[in-house]
Image: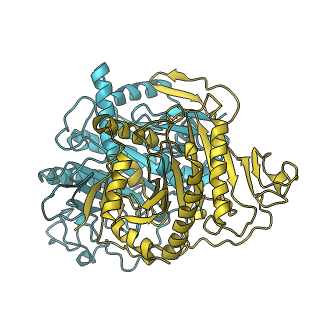
Chain colours: A cyan, B yellow
């Protein structure tokens, strides 16, 4: 019998449809394989093919926009938003608009074209999270912005247009709808119970154990109770922490460890799937709070999503999260 | 300069990113072409390959589950939900679950494998909408259900697994999140202004004209102000009408006309794209109201949607709706 489950944070119901395909290999469509690209604009020596860098790590004396870096952040060459100008908010009858002002940047995670995030060294992954933080802190000085979104598309089916491993950042003058919903819902829960709903969920999941995937000193990785997608996984700090960019220094190493370990298990169980992840953190100006708990939502790209889901907010997931968790726990 | 626009009903902001590809031919990936299938379970003569029919039109004396029909509705052979049993709602700590009870049916729109919804006769398309109504009215007698979702996936990239043109219906014991949000938001607007927000929008769009695509005696087709996708189109009754299944008889013919005309223009402008549509109507038990206005949301499958959108509820649309509307208006 399929099951209907409700996500306690967003209030979204999903169907966990146990009668359909659910073994990991039923999903595999296309493994992400690095083929190499002779004219890759993200490789060392091609720095001139990207807009001028806004951040680089690892240089020992080499100049801006030249080789020698271990990580590099550049503006997106085809940005979705423009960095110049005012917001010019205005109404048009029923409607509201403003200028598409924002920042759109690319974090080139390593100079080595042959790596994926799963194969970069632990220290290298830690650097990526430091770069996220540095860019967030810098962009928060711009008073036009209300939210900074960090995300990664891995593999062409997940929307990556360049093979060289990278993440992206968009700074926005609005808070995205789904983040706003999560924060508001967590706030209502807190107002009622004076507890963080994510902290409560983490406590329950650590007792139940059936949806736990990994844990280390500061983080856990778990399959949420009502996942939209097969093998959807959340990585959360174990202790309450409301903003990614404010996490204590020792957390960077822990996050790097759990991310690498998780991705290697995912690659093993699902044969190098494409995936997306997004960082959900508190909006700018609300960073310090007791109700919202920042986390990473990881979504392997395994099933075709139709307009049905867009039109309804309703998801059919063929894999119970308890089974996905077991596969990931048992993976080597 | 890109623009940020807010949908007045859902409160969702989208980026209309004018600097990116936006001419219709920039999107074309794969035209939906009917290839034919020798063992199609939806073709006449193969009635035994589907579960037994729950509705058929056009029979002149031929028996159940035999050829002779012009339209046929059958339970989905691989249903996402099970029709038997009670809901058994229960809590599990923080979480809520219930049995996956529901109906999942397929509307086989025509016996002719070579048709698409765009090429079926006007009378044939009208029959499809009558079938939607008949199945809704029947399923509403089941007190376990709160919502009936009608939708169509056209073409493999949009999630259709069988080529023979068909729509689907899911009866659910819950109201899907996005529908709930729309209804609640429309209700808040009504409580404040004593007007339907959709009626206000229609009035404004018919004056502005720039986003209008088609109109006839009872319906209009328009590009919404803040569309998530290129060429996203809504078809709405011009006069307030809160429930699809309660629309007056003459509306069926009008809806059939505007749907056919719209799909033919879409095929012409975008070279036979795959698409999804969903019918948004009032939840069961709230059918008669002054605040919600039923409509069809049509979403051509033109761009790759990444986890970014899933994780944020934030969309980047490369085609301004005014341009899409112009292409569709000028199409022959």
Residue A313 pos. (x, y %): 47, 45
Task: Give the residue furthest to the bottom.
Answer: A38
Q: Which residue is found at the position 28% from the left and 73% from the top?
A: A44
Q: Is residue A14 above or below residue A309?
A: above
Task: Give coordinates of residue A45: x percent, y percent.
Answer: 27, 77
| Residue at screen point 31% across, 19% down | A193
Residue A99 pos. (x, y %): 20, 61
Residue A40 shows in the view: yes
* B110 relative to A266 in the view: left or right: right
The quadrant the N terminus of chain B occupies is bottom left
Q: How many marks?
A: 0
Q: Vertical placement of B147 versus A86: above or below?
A: above
- Say which of A94 and A72 sits in front: A94
Q: Which residue shows up at 70% across the image and 62% down it? A: B164
Q: Is residue A191 above or below residue B302?
A: above
Is residue A147 toward the left or the right of residue B14 in the image? left
Q: Residue shown at 15%/71% (left/top)? A: A64
Residue A330: x and y in percent read 56, 40
Q: Is residue A162 visible?
A: no
- Residues B317 and B136: in front is B136
Q: Nearer the viewer, residue A267 or B159?
A: B159
Task: Judge left or right: residue A191 versus residue A277.
Answer: left
């Amino acid at each position: 019998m399929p099951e209907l489950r409700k996500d306690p944070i967003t209030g979204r119901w999903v169907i966990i449809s146990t009668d359909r395909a659910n073994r990991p290999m039923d999903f595999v469509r296309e493994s992400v394989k690095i083929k190499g690209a002779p004219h890759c604009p993200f490789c060392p020596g091609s720095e001139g093919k990207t807009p001028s860098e806004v951040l680089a790590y690892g240089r020992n004396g080499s100049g801006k926009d030249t080789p020698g870096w271990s990580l590099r952040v550049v503006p997106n060459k085809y940005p979705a938003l423009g960095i110049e100008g005012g917001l010019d908010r205005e109404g048009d009858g029923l409607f509201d608009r403003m200028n598409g002002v924002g920042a759109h940047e690319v974090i080139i995670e390593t100079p080595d074209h042959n790596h994926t995030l799963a194969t970069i060294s632990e220290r290298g992954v830690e650097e990526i999270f430091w770069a996220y933080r540095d860019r967030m802190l810098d962009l928060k000085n711009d008073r036009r912005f209300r939210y900074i979104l960090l995300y990664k598309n891995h593999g062409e089916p997940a929307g990556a247009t360049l093979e060289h491993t990278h993440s992206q950042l968009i700074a926005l003058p609005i808070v995205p709808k789904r983040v706003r919903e999560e924060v508001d819902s967590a706030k209502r829960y807190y107002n009622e119970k004076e507890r963080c709903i994510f902290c409560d969920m983490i406590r329950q999941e650590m007792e139940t154990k059936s949806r736990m995937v990994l844990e280390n000193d500061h983080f856990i990785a778990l399959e949420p109770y009502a996942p939209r997608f097969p093998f959807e996984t959340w990585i959360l700090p174990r202790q309450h922490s409301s903003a990614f960019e404010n996490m204590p220094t020792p957390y960077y190493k822990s996050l790097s460890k759990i991310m690498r370990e998780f991705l290697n298990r995912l690659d093993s169980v699902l044969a190098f799937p494409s995936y997306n992840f997004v960082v959900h953190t508190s909006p700018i100006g609300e960073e310090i709070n007791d109700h919202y708990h920042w986390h990473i939502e990881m979504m392997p790209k395994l099933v075709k999503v139709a307009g049905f889901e867009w039109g309804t907010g309703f998801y059919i997931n063929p894999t119970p999260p308890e089974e996905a968790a077991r596969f990931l726990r048992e993976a080597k």
